[in-house]
Image: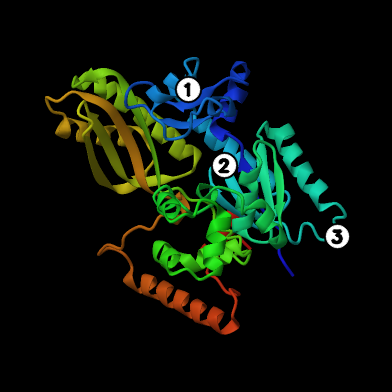
Amino acid sequence: MAKVILHIDLNAFFVRCEELLDPSIKGKPVIIGHEGRAGIVSTCSYEARKYGVHSGMPTFQAIKLCPNLIIIHGHYDLYSKKSREFINFVKRYSSIIEQASIDECFVDMSEALKGVKDPLGYIKNIQDSLYKETGLMCSIGVASTKFLAKMGSDYKKPMGITVIRRKDIPDILYPLPIESFFGIGKKTAPKLRAMGINTIGDLAKRIENNDEATKQVFGKFYYAIKDWITGYGSDVVETEPFDPKSIGNSTTFKFNTNNFDIIKEYVRDLSKEVSDRAKEANKVGSTIQLTLKDSDRKVITRSKKIDKATNDFQVIFDVSLDLLKANLSSKLFRLAGVTLQNLIDPIDEVIQMSIFDNYDEIQDECAAKLLIGELNRKMNKAVFKTAADSLRDKKYGIK
């Protein structure tokens, strides 16, 4: 029997968080980003999009399109907090959740909807309750595969609910521009258009005819595309938690400078923001990276690996400052960034074995894990696990 998969996508998430912080900006053209020639639009409100503003656009171009644009640098600790609220809310309805990013997740509702007389009304209640309790708006795609559910959540925004059954694919997906096909990026779309593939329907026709040129464009990805477009893609919602590998912040200076004391203050603020965000996410990192961009737009990236993973502000700032001292030159700089990389959960931190470690204990632990793996393979399911794995699974809500 087909599964019921939801893809829940928060609408203009960062901007919505800012509206909750400052209701006066609601209904106005807003971007999250920075001013200056090097500023980039991170995301924007639906009102800003009406002017042609979009994510990834240089801020100065966005201002040309919309002179009354409101520019907000962003409150990333708030975004992290609201994201956790979102996921905790969804967990009330199903324990089978795959967090795809800070503002979206897949949910397997197959069991939760058994016996529900009005499934669509039930899903609408999820949408309305999320808005009422958290202030967050979302669009929801409902389908039997993850791909179709994702396409459904993108179909109507904001606050849309779209059901895509296999028989609905020609009516709903085929007329859409090829760029809207999830998984087809900015580099591939122009190649397809050059071949006369302008819509998803055009692509479906080529795949139906087993077109060799289309196969060459996609390579191994072709067969996944073929499954997706015919409604036979993956329906497995992975319950592993969304796990960012790095947390970073950057800022463009008010004016170009190579003054150490001025840049030092920017680096201090950035280190504090990164530290706060890492603590919010309960992450520690073992590599600290400093990024500098000079007035000629040349980017310098330097990093240092530290002995013990951390999210401590002082450590992040001290290492970043050392990197700044070693790389500051007579050139004028316009941007600085600080990133904490190789993030792990403190509970998962592995301490490297030294000559003082008890080798026999470590060897016994490895042997136990090998034995558990062999037993599980014979049982064809994960029946056995170590005590450490049990604690970790309990923490993440994995059964």
The residue under label 3 is: 115
Q: Nearer the viewer, residue 22 or 146?
A: 146
Residue drawn 38% across and 22% down? 60
Crowding at mark 3 (Cα within 10 Å: few <14, some 14-19, many 20+):
few
Quadrant for residue 297, please give it: top left
The percent coordinates of residue 323 (x first, y second) are: 21, 35
The answer, for residue 87, to whether it is visible in the render is no
Looking at the rendered structure, the secondary structure element under dot 2 is loop
Residue behind mark 1: 72
Q: Identify the element where label 1 is drawn.
A: strand
Marks 1 and 3 sit apart, C-alpha to C-alpha, by 46 Å
Residue 198: numbered disc = none
Q: Position of residue 390 (x, y in %)?
A: 57, 63
- Looking at the picture, does residue 308 appear above or below residue 235? above
Specify the amino acid type for callout 1.
Answer: Ile
Amino acid type at mark 3: Gly
Q: Quadrant of the N terminus?
A: bottom right
Outermost front residue: 196
Furthest residue in direction left, as rendered: 330
- The x, y position of residue 248, in whole percent, is 38, 37
Q: Residues within 10 Å of mark 1 (few under 14, many from 20)?
A: some
Disc on the earlier residue, 1 or 2: 1
Q: Residue at x 53, y 23 (%)?
A: 30
The answer to whether residue 110 is seen in the rendering is: yes
Nearer the observer, 232 or 299? 232
> Which residue is identified by label 2?
103
